[in-house]
């Protein structure tokens, strides 16, 4: 217990005492999955970043609530095989600091099954178009897993451990950037239609000129899957 | 009286286990339990096993019947041994690689899947041993397989038929007869995909 407390204090003090930018807040997410048939499905996702703590104004983190942005995402997903899915999507971002932006997204994701858990690998490319800046192009890779906390598989009403890590390589006006996102948390699997997750999402960037921004989000995510619209292909 | 209560539950399970196409769905729940919740008879049998690795116990239910399972590693393979509520062994399942299945059985299984699906991918292969209680009880004491035991193959695959991919579990006899085919409802992945 003491060792755990030491690591938490060490981690937080490292972030807050340094001159790096540190901000933290709440990040609610809502995902609605509407299967169209056995192959195609539509997914709507709403996510919002709300800053609570920031060290930009002072040398130390202080309470400064601000709604930073809200993303509205729409995806069409297709099952290429049972465990391989392709998707393309569009995102509209409501940004409180700059003009709203549009993003096109393409991704492919596949499941690797192990004896007691699974890993979903996702390769994503996206292009962000802004009115006041050059377009930004990004290449992303994420590995994510949900590990059962009771038994060998996740059954209805059980909890799971959520772990994921993502690398994001971006290019904008001939300048490269690299960001890392690590997520750890717990989820409650109500059933195959409803999932609730609480997680910490730790984002660091940029890597090329040395990390100078740390963002720690408390994510609260709810996923809801509807029944199939049509039973024919 | 207890048996009478089970009748409507059994009918309900039949209704929810089959959809309009008559296909059977796998519907099981498994929870990790401590040794003190395991039937004494089952513990007595496992205490006789020549297994040094840690044994983990689970209670499994298909919402009509309950059974107990112990899982462990023995001779480089993962095993699960299933017991009924009185502690009698029901079967032993050995997790194997596809290549470890005898060639004549691999041929039989391949033929079944090729006839049934346009495309398929193997996910998990298990050899199931059933038979005389005495033979099952002594399985983990001898490295030689008792010929009295009946062998079946429990294979999980992802298969494509009628343009749609689904996950299946097949139980196939050593003569190549499909004894059971069930659809496995996989957990949705939207939280890991998006």
Image (cartoon, coloured by chain):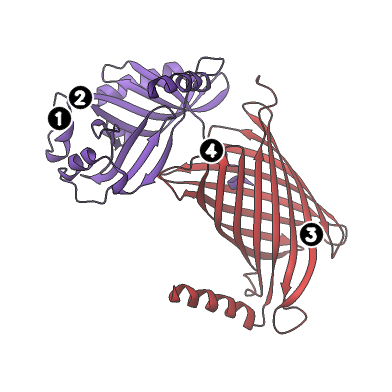
Chain colours: A red, B purple
Q: Position of residue B155 (x, y in %)?
A: 37, 29
Q: Which residue is mark 2?
A: B131
Q: Which residue is mark 4?
A: B187
Q: Nearer the viewer, residue A4 or A173?
A: A4
Say which quarter of the image contains residue A109.
top right
Q: Which residue is mark 1?
A: B135
* Label 3: chain letter: A
Q: Position of residue B174 (x, y in %)?
A: 26, 20
**CB under 8 Å between discs 2 and 3:** no
Mark seen at residue A69: 3
Residue at mark 3 to residue at mark 4: CA–CA distance: 31 Å
Residue A162 appearing in the image: yes
Residue at mark 2 to residue at mark 1: CA–CA distance: 7 Å
**CB under 8 Å between discs 2 and 1:** yes
* Label 1: chain letter: B
- With B163 as the anchor, is B100 left or right in this view? left
| Label 3: how many Cα within 10 Å (few below 14, some 14–19, many 20+) | some
Residue at mark 2 to residue at mark 4: CA–CA distance: 34 Å
The structure residue drawn at horizontal position 84% and vertical position 57%, both measured from the top left corner, is A130
| Label 2: how many Cα within 10 Å (few below 14, some 14–19, many 20+) | some
Report the mark closest to the observer, 3 or 4.
Answer: 4
Q: Looking at the image, is A150 positioned above or below residue B129? A: below
The structure residue drawn at horizontal position 65% and vertical position 62%, both measured from the top left corner, is A218
């Amino acid at each position: 217990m003491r060792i755990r407390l030491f690591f938490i204090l060490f981690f937080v003090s490292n972030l807050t005492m340094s001159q790096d930018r540190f901000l933290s807040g709440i990040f609610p997410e809502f995902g609605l999955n509407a299967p169209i048939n056995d192959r195609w499905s539509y997914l709507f996702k709403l996510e919002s970043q709300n800053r609570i703590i920031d060290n930009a104004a002072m040398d130390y983190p202080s309470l400064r609530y601000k709604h930073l942005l809200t993303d509205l995402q729409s995806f069409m997903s297709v099952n290429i095989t049972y465990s391989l899915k392709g998707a393309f999507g569009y995102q509209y971002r409501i940004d409180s600091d700059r003009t709203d932006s549009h993003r096109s997204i393409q991704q492919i994701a596949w499941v690797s099954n192990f004896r007691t858990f699974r890993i979903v690998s996702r390769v994503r490319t996206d292009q962000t178009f802004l009115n006041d800046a050059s377009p930004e192009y990004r290449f992303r890779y994420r590995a994510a897993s949900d590990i059962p906390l009771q038994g060998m598989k996740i059954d209805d009403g059980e909890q799971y451990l959520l772990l994921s890590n993502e690398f994001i390589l971006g290019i904008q006006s001939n300048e490269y950037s690299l960001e890392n996102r690590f997520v750890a948390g717990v989820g409650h699997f109500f059933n195959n239609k409803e999932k609730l997750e609480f997680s910490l999402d730790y984002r660091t960037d940029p890597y090329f000129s040395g990390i100078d921004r740390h963002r720690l989000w408390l994510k609260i995510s709810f996923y809801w899957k509807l029944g199939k619209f049509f039973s024919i292909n | 009286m207890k048996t009478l209560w089970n009748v409507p539950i059994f009918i309900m399970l039949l209704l929810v286990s089959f959809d309009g196409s008559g296909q059977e769905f796998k519907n099981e729940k498994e929870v990790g339990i401590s040794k003190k919740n395991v039937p004494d008879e089952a513990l007595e049998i496992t205490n006789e096993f020549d297994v040094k690795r840690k044994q983990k116990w689970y209670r499994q239910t298909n919402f009509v019947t309950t059974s107990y399972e112990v899982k462990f590693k023995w001779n480089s393979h993962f095993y699960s041994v299933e017991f009924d509520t009185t502690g009698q062994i029901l079967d032993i399942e050995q997790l194997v690689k596809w290549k470890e299945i005898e060639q004549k059985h691999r041929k039989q299984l391949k033929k079944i899947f090729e006839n049934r699906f346009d495309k398929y991918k193997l996910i998990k292969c298990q050899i199931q041993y059933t038979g005389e209680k005495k033979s099952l009880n002594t399985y983990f004491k001898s490295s030689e397989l008792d010929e009295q035991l009946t062998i079946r193959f429990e294979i999980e695959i992802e298969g494509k038929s009628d343009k749609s991919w689904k996950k299946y579990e097949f139980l196939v006899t050593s003569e190549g007869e499909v004894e059971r085919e069930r659809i496995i409802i996989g957990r949705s992945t939207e939280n890991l995909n998006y």
